[in-house]
Amino acid sequence: MLTSTNNGVPEKDGNPSIGAAEVIGRVVRHDQWARSEPTTKAGMASCIGSDMSIVGNIECKGPAQVFGRIEGEVRASDLQISDGAQVEGSVIAQNVTVCGRVKGTIRAVRVKLQSGGAVEGDIFHRSLSIDENSQFEGSSRRVENPTDPSSSVDAKGPQKKGTAPAPLPSINAELGDGPKH
């Protein structure tokens, strides 16, 4: 194994006991995800372990699976938030499966909130499925391009700056003084 040094010249790792098999063994096979479908041809996913806690933004070019705790924005092509995992912050991916807990905004083409999963925040999606025994506290909005931040600026839809929404007519005005026969 090679490690980099301060001068930028790679040198041999002092611990030769870690072999390629161990490093490869740390990568989770995407087809082994609990309650998930394979979404990539390569079948491999990056993994945040259950003993890991990360504060900061994470960007993964391929699929990712979270077992630990993340505080910050998470981006991946496909994201599985496993049972026991926690994400506090924005989640942006093509496909998101939630078996753990998310506190923040989810933006994904397909969102699956599976049994035991919990989301506290807004979900912008093209497709949303919520299983029985899952929890969702927030608002859901179907948008054509959910991963584009401009499509989720306001859950009630875009409004012109400086203009207030038109007031709703009161129910008394609609009913008048009484029923009309």
Image (spheres, rainbow, N blue to C red):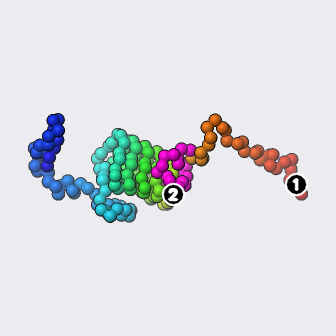
Q: Quadrant of residue 4?
A: top left
Q: Residue at x 53, y 48 (%)?
A: 151
Q: Residue at x 53, y 55 (%)?
A: 144
Is 119 included in the stretch rendered in magenta?
Answer: no
Report how far apart the C-alphas of labels 2 and 1 lie in the structure. Answer: 44 Å
The stretch in magenta equals: 133-154
Say what secondary structure mark 2 lies in. strand
10 Å crowding of disc 2: few (<14), some (14-19), many (20+) = some
Kindly identify which numbered label has been placed on residue 6. Answer: none
Residue holding disc 2: 126
Sequence order check, earlier mark of 2 and 1: 2
Which one is in front, 70 or 73? 73
Q: Residue 147's spot in the image, x, y percent?
A: 46, 51
Q: Residue at x 39, y 49 (%)?
A: 75
Q: Residue furthest right?
A: 181
**Left or right relative to 143: residue 49:** left
Badge 2 amino acid: Arg
Q: Residue at x 31, y 49 (%)?
A: 48
Q: Quadrant of residue 41?
A: bottom left
Is 138 included in the stretch rendered in magenta?
Answer: yes
Give the position of the C terminus as an image quadrant: bottom right
Q: Residue 115's spot in the image, x, y percent?
A: 45, 59
Q: Residue 125's spot in the image, x, y percent?
A: 50, 54
Residue holding disc 1: 180
- Tell me: residue 3, above or below residue 142: above
Which one is in front, 164 or 45? 164
Is any atom of residue 28 visible in this view?
yes
10 Å crowding of disc 1: few (<14), some (14-19), many (20+) = few
Say what secondary structure mark 1 lies in. loop
Is any atom of residue 116 visible in this view?
no
Q: Residue 51's spot in the image, x, y percent?
A: 29, 47
Q: How many marks?
A: 2
